[in-house]
Image (cartoon, rainbow, N blue to C red):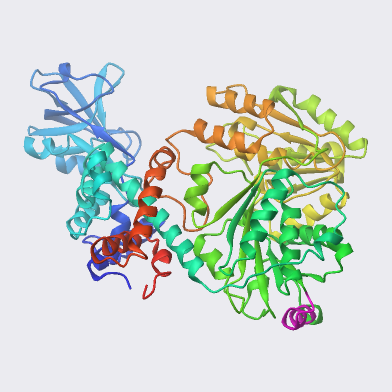
Amino acid sequence: MRPDCLNPLFAEIESLDGVGPKLKKPLERLGLSRVRDVLYHLPERFVTRRVVADLDDGQVGENVVVALTVVEHRAPFNPGRGPYRVMAQDAKGNICALTYFGRASYTAKKQLPVGETRWVAGRLDQYDQTLQIVHPDHVAEKSDEAMGKMVEPIYRLAEGLTQPRIASFVEQSLARIPDLPEWIDAGTLSRENWPAWGSALASAHAGDDAKAKDRLAYDELFANALALMLVRQSNKARKGQSLQGDGSLRDKLQLPFPLTGAQTRSIAEITGDMAQASPMLRLLQGDVGAGKTVVALEAMLAAVEAGAQAAMLAPTELLARQHFETLRAMAKPTGVEIALLTGRDKGRARESILMGLIDGSIDMVIGTHAIFQDTVSYKNLGLVVIDEQHRFGVSQRLLLTQKGKVTPHTLAMTATPIPRTLTLAQYGEMEVSRLDEMPPGRQAIDTRVLPLGRLDEIAEAVGRHVSGGQQAYWVCPMVRGTESETEDLAAAEARYASLKNRFGDDVVLVHGQLAPEMKDAAMARFASGDARVLVATTVIEVGVDVPNATLMVIEQAERFGLAQLHQLRGRVGRGSEKSTCLLLRGNELSETGKRRLELMKNSQDGFELAEEDLALRGGGELLGTRQSGEEGFSIASLEQVTRLLPVAHDDAKLLVESQSGLDNATRGEAARMVLYLLERDWGVQTLRGG
């Protein structure tokens, strides 16, 4: 249960003065439905103003506070068309126009009576030869009212909300902050010179306070690390089953290639975990083409050898079918019974699979979420393999493991090499195995950077490629152009139309806004070889395996992150033929864009590229590889994650080891508090009495 002292923070947002049904919707669009959400809706930036004695003292473009006396009101010639101007003068007689558009003119008439002096805060600009302030931020009768606005937070808004409204809600929310026990280790707090939690929140809303922001980011990282560790600790204490295979099925495998050292090491780590009584929680990270599927098959066969069943969960039906075909072909010599179960299966076929899982005649099942529905039961589910590309959160990963009579072993797989820091942030409850070697015989992909201006030549090259019997991908960064996008922005639909005009029905289109059945049909045509060119947005980034596709064209490649480019490139080079990846760049390249494309040209190592990607993206951007589960960070920036997470992780580890499940009254109570406050309560739920 959430501690009572946090209840005021989890009160509905309507409990704040001024929030009615009309404002509730725009607030919800910002993700603000409770008082706590308002507290963590931190300013995007701050406006700093300077008091000037007169307009001569101010600079054009500067935010100022100045006393002005109203001279006259000038309405536009046609009411409602053009600006409404209030002419005012400073102490020296310099004239300034206070300019209003639309309905704001009603406010101007009320706030600025002729002959009265007002303190005006706003940005000083120039129009023709006249100084002006467009839509003043504040108009005050007394100087002390204006002086309170010298540093002002600017919040992200939704339509229907204003800065003063949000500021009022923040002020009310700050007044409700309870006195909470300190959860940060005293040594860390003193070394970093961080303020207490409540003070940090107040400071972060009041000004650009780096210490306060770091403190709040650290809280989020600490809560996340602590929750993941509690899950890991709880998992070790849970009852699992020791699965020790005798090798009888694995010895029958006839793989066309020897295993790499990384595969052999990972298989040993996984089977070692499975032999323990406590349930395995392990992440298998493998670069594109590093052979994760073989490792997963070895683990699944080890489970079957030990008398248990194995299940593999894939994010899409297309990928589930692909895994099913691949695993069935590889496992054929072993004679194990493998089934495919998706939401599309109905009637007798479905009943037959469900019966086979209950009576144990089916050893392995591959499928989508359908394999974990309430209607699906297993005789003895011993191993769950999750193809992690569908980006589950921790609590969902835990739910999937509740299908066995005892907790099954769990192996999660990801094809995206993740920098070590981010692995810790997203999979801290798991042990990690890395496939950092490529199988022998896998050819490097010839990667070239070309200007967009050579589109016609490239389309001709695609034509030659296709007429030679091979297939090609053509990836665009956007689905369709909107008014806000520049004209040169390639839209997948426009590119599809032009290529279809050239190649006819050999071209198919796939993007995220297509109905699932249309997307599946287009993918199926391409996978079967019926279509030769697949035009797509990044939906094909993961999970498409077409060995006959040997050309990848990525338009406006500078718009993609390194990790994403590497994933896309990995769609080719899957067969025995030489493959090529063409990165088409726009005319105006930033230094980061140049560096990105240079790295892509020179490196095929996904782990190296992931680390470089993290360094290039820098501090301004939120966690780019964020999951759609709960581990997304809303407070900590990418720069803060890389800088503060190692400290937060060590502090959380020390706490869990020294407090054995947070039983200690003082520190344990404080730690539980931060887990609830930052909504990592799935960590608390693993504790006895939760």
Total number of numbered discs in the rendering: 0
Q: In this image, 455 relative to 92: left or right?
A: right
Query: Which residue is depicted at the point 77% across and 37% down?
Result: 498
Residue 353 covered by magenta stretch? yes
Which of these two is toward me, 491 or 604?
604
Residue 555 in the image: x percent, y percent? Answer: 68, 33
Residue 543 in the image: x percent, y percent? Answer: 71, 51
The quarter of the image holding the C terminus is bottom left
Residue 310 in the image: x percent, y percent? Answer: 71, 69
- In the rendered image of this protein, does residue 380 appear above or below residue 41? below
Query: Which residue is depicted at the point 51% across and 30% down?
Result: 616
Q: Which residues are magenta?
A: 351-362
Which of these two is toward me, 373 or 469?
373
- Whether residue 80 appears in this view of the structure is yes
Residue 391 in the image: x percent, y percent? Answer: 58, 56
Main SS of residues in magenta: helix
To which quarter of the image does residue 641 belong?
A: top left
